[in-house]
Amino acid sequence: MGLPILDSILGIIKGPLDKLVPDNNKKAEFKHELEMEILRTGMGQMEINKTEAQHPSVFVAGWRPFIGWVCGVALFWHFMGADLLGWARVAFFPDMPAPPVLGGSETLVTVLLSMLGLGGLRTVEKIKGVSREK
């Protein structure tokens, strides 16, 4: 279908599906229904994103951009900025002491993936209609 996520999901379930459903027509029907459900979920997420982006409160509309920028800047610093600054320090200021090493990239990645996961769980709640709107 051209969407990598669909190909991945269908690839995972293809083996058990072949064993559980011997009829090729039923298999094709099931595959089509699964694709449609995944696409409906994606469309639901797009609607939620639009609604959140239009919210007047920066705490609702701005949390994703804030986390994105913080994690993006931190990842840039950890993987490129610190090395470039270290190189410039050695090249142009060899007598300057080295800055302290900042660790925590594991924590940063954990926070980023957790926030993305929570956003996904919130989406599932909204799609299923069990979220509390106040």
Image: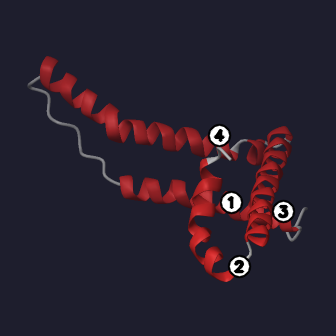
Q: Residue at x 57, y 62 (%)?
A: 11
Earlier-in-chain disc, 2 versus 1? 2
Residue count near mark 4 (Cα–Cα under 10 Å), binned few <14, some 14–19, many ≥20: few
Task: Tell me where residue 7 appears, x and y as whole percent.
Answer: 61, 54
Of labels 2 and 4, the one closer to you: 2
Left-right relation of 87 to 123 = left
Earlier-in-chain disc, 2 versus 4? 2
Kindly indicate whether the residue at mark 1 contacts the one at mark 2 (C-beta within 8 angstroms).
Answer: no
Kindly indicate whether the residue at mark 3 contacts the one at mark 1 (C-beta within 8 angstroms).
Answer: no
In the rendering, which numbered label is found on residue 120? 1
**Which image quadrant for residue 116?**
bottom right
For the residue pair 72 and 89, the one nearer the viewer reads as 72
> Looking at the picture, which amino acid does disc 4 mark?
Pro
Kindly indicate whether the residue at mark 4 contacts the one at mark 3 (C-beta within 8 angstroms).
Answer: no
- Residue that badge 2 annotates: 21
- Residue that badge 3 annotates: 127
Residue count near mark 2 (Cα–Cα under 10 Å), binned few <14, some 14–19, many ≥20: few
Looking at the picture, the colour scheme in use is secondary structure
Residue count near mark 3 (Cα–Cα under 10 Å), binned few <14, some 14–19, many ≥20: some
